[in-house]
Image (spheres, helix red, strand yellow):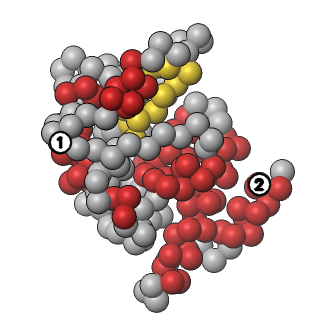
Amino acid sequence: MYDTEVLKPSNTGKLIADLIPQTYAFLWSRTEVDHALLDLIKNEKYQPFIIFPSEYATEEQQVFHQSVVLNNKKQPLFILLDGSWREAKKMFRKSPYLQGIPILSIDPQQLLAKDYLPKYHIRTSAKGHQLATAEVAALVLAVIGEHNNAAILDSWFDYYNYQYQRSVCQSNKGDAEAEQRYKRLIAK
């Protein structure tokens, strides 16, 4: 997480930790690397992937588009950079320890529909592939075959999105049925 992202009530990264038990969160610093993060990335139990658009990949980075090849003996470790897009790009560029990690590039227009629009209305993005952190995490879960967990996270995100917009009295473009859909999914 970018250092200020954790303080923002509009942060969606926290929604992942609400539902996925093995979630780790680290504050990013340009000058200091959290050794627990490095240990996690280097742990032989995991196969790390950074979730980021392929256009930012370095020449030596392996890029997967919409799917990954997993080593059956290892658990996937998906690294999401949580912050605004300007912050996420800075985190990606200024973190040399991420440069050798394969990229999983998610394009919602290819995975969902050509006319897919991001559902996060609290902050706006410059490009259609720039989704909220929780939206991306739900797509990643779907890509690896965790469709039920993807649907639960997606509906939890919709519910949060709707309630947040209600709480700040802004024009609400969220899904008013999100709470009922979320409750139905977790009751299964």
Q: Farthest right residue?
A: 188
Residue 110 appears in the figure:
no
Residue 152 appears in the figure:
yes
Residue at 15%, 39% (x, y): give it: 31
Determine which quarter of the picture holds residue 39. Answer: top left
Give percent across and percent down for residue 78.
46, 33
Residue at 59%, 73% (x, y): give it: 175
Gap in angstroms between the C-alphas marked 1 and 2: 39 Å
Please, what is the three-letter code of the amino acid marked with disc 2?
Ile
For the residue carrying disc 1, how many other residues have a C-alpha within 10 Å: few (<14), some (14-19), or many (20+)? few
Q: Nearer the viewer, residue 43 or 135?
A: 43
Give percent across and percent down for residue 16.
54, 50
Q: Which residue is mark 1?
A: 30
For the residue carrying disc 2, how many other residues have a C-alpha within 10 Å: few (<14), some (14-19), or many (20+)? some
Please, what is the three-letter code of the amino acid marked with disc 1?
Arg
Helix, strand or loop for disc 1: loop
Determine which quarter of the picture holds residue 98. Answer: top left
In the image, residue 171 above or below residue 62: below
Q: Farthest bottom residue?
A: 169
Q: Which residue is mark 2?
A: 186
Q: Earlier in the sequence, mark 1 or mark 2?
A: 1
Give percent across and percent down for residue 124.
32, 67
